[in-house]
Amino acid sequence: MASAYPAGPTRWEALFGDLEGQARAQSAAEADALVSELTRAEHATMTLADRFRAVVGAVVTLELLDGAPLRGVVREVADEWTLLQGVRPEPASQHLVPLAAIAGVHGLGRQAASATSRRDALGLGPVLRTLQRDRARVTVRTLGGTVGGRIARVGRDHLDIDVLDDRGTRLVPFSALLAVSEAP
């Protein structure tokens, strides 16, 4: 006996199949849009320090606000600064660079890493006070030029450097700092 129903899908089955396919496509598009929105929201919380934290141990080239490059291995990162170990063609000394002094960076990936220790919140002051305590010879680079000496005092937003050449003292606001480097 022959069936009263056609062998292929009925018009209703095709209609419901089409509606189900449209629903799946719309659901996938909404999921893609949600993922994109969440990704944008995550990127909005990312800081420059987070980007540097993700590449500790890698070589980067900083373009400082004076336009000069500074190339080195990222050794340490805090919310306000990064410490580079110079690599050729730069001297092999260490360079403390305020993040606010950076105009551009080559060598950062797209990834980020959040702060994980209390040290990440250290400002410039405590680091500069350590250099002051150790009586380290430094080269201080600003938009106004470079001066060598020893850090005499560190205030909340500035430092005094005893200039070795003329035995005078020069006050440098933190906002003017481009880099503080180990002197050769």
Image (tube, rainbow, N blue to C red):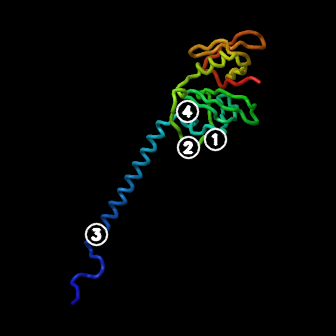
Query: Mark 4 belongs to which amino acid?
Result: Ala
- SS for dot 4: helix
Q: CA distance from mark 1 to mark 3?
A: 54 Å
Structural crowding at the residue carrying mark 1, measured as other residues with C-alpha within 10 Å and reported as few (<14), some (14–19) or many (≥20): few
Q: CA distance from mark 3 to mark 2?
A: 45 Å
Q: Is residue 174 left or right of residue 5?
A: right
Q: Earlier in the sequence, mark 4 or mark 1?
A: 4
Q: CA distance from mark 2 to mark 4?
A: 13 Å
Query: Mark 3 belongs to which amino acid?
Result: Leu
The structure residue drawn at horizontal position 54% and vertical position 42%, both measured from the top left corner, is: 111
Which dot marks residue 53? none
Q: Are marks 3 and 4 in contact (CB under 8 Å)?
A: no
Give residue 183's position: percent from left, percent from top.
74, 23
Q: Earlier in the sequence, mark 3 or mark 2?
A: 3
Q: Are marks 2 and 1 in contact (CB under 8 Å)?
A: no
Q: CA distance from mark 2 to mark 1?
A: 10 Å
Q: CA distance from mark 4 to mark 1?
A: 14 Å
Q: Is residue 63 visible?
A: yes
Which dot marks residue 110? 2
Which dot marks residue 107? 1
Q: Which residue is mark 3?
A: 15
Nearest to the observer: residue 51 or residue 29: 51
Q: Is residue 145 visible?
A: no
Query: Mark 1 belongs to which amino acid?
Result: Gly
- SS for dot 1: loop
Q: Earlier in the sequence, mark 2 or mark 4?
A: 4
Give residue 135's position: percent from left, percent from top.
70, 16
Give residue 106's position: percent from left, percent from top.
64, 39
- SS for dot 3: helix
Which dot marks residue 49? 4
